[in-house]
Image (cartoon, helix red, strand yellow):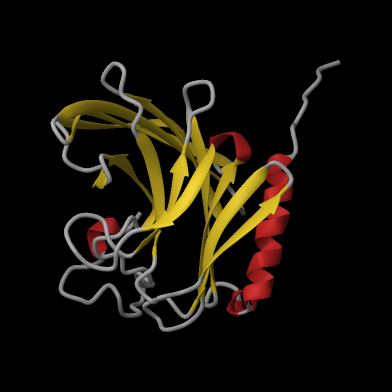
Amino acid sequence: MIMSEIGTGEDYHQLQKWGMDILKVGESLGSGALAILKKDSLIRLGKTESAEFKKVEEGPIFSSFKLMYKGWDVLGQEYELEEHISIQANKRWFQSEVLLRTPESLTDTLVVGIVNLKDSNQVSLIHANMQVLFTHGDQSEHKDALGMALLIPDQHYSGVSKAPVSGEGVTNSELLYLKPSGGVYNYYFYAGWEMEHQEFSKEEYFRDQLRDTMQELSVELKVSVK
């Protein structure tokens, strides 16, 4: 971990010996950040009474942690949210499972987003039991190709939209509306960068990788012990 060594006295959006931050997010929802749609307003997850981090698992194949927020102020109503984020070795995605506790009788919409500051095309894919919203183009701060995608199981998909390009609150974002299944929301965020793998400069290659990932994530695993 080198967080204590980067971004001090240097521009972390320029290539350094440790690498660089290739994603400028501004007032967007960045790389899969969350918000609530309430009364036609998008309220990002941010201002809370408390925020807690808990490491769940850490290993060479699989790692995960939980983020727990209490007292999230959404236009005068207080919400609680728990997000369980996990990663697997050799995968270009992370998984997010979200438990949202809302004030009684409220049915506001949970929203996840992708930054779009470079006016890249929004594209949707449908495959097996999953839907994908993605952008691709020269949208990295290194001025080369970057693809970003949200992968949503069908039972959690509730539509897509765009945030405004200016104004107060969340802007410059491709938005995907979520609905719960069994009380939980589930989605994946996927990214592929040209500097990491040159083939990601091609949109069709990025599409193919997304299709393969959708197929992989749609397969139900059954384990038996003999």
Residue 58: tell me if it is visible.
Answer: no
- Left or right of 196: which side holds 107? left
Q: Is residue 9 above or below residue 94?
A: below
Q: Residue 6's quadrant in the figure?
A: bottom left
Q: State the image coordinates of residue 157 (x, y, percent, origin top left).
A: 54, 41
Q: Is residue 65 above or below residue 3?
A: above
Q: Residue at x 62, y 49 (%)?
A: 131
Q: State the image coordinates of residue 215 (x, y, percent, origin top left).
A: 74, 48
Q: Nearer the viewer, residue 41 or 100?
A: 41
**Quadrant location of the N terminus in the rendered image:** bottom left
Q: State the image coordinates of residue 106 (x, y, percent, origin top left).
A: 31, 24
**Residue sitting at the far bottom:** 143
Q: Residue at x 25, y 46 (%)?
A: 41
- Left or right of 195: which side holds 98? left
- Left or right of 167: which side holds 223? right
**Residue sitting at the far right:** 226
Q: Is residue 223 above or below residue 30?
A: above
Residue 220: tell me if it is visible.
Answer: yes
Q: Residue at x 47, y 80 (%)?
A: 138
Q: State the image coordinates of residue 185 (x, y, percent, origin top left).
A: 48, 32
Q: Residue 71's quadrant in the figure?
A: top left
Q: Nearer the viewer, residue 191 or 121?
A: 121
Count of numbered circles on the image: 0
Q: Residue at x 21, y 43 (%)?
A: 46
**Quadrant location of the C terminus in the rendered image:** top right
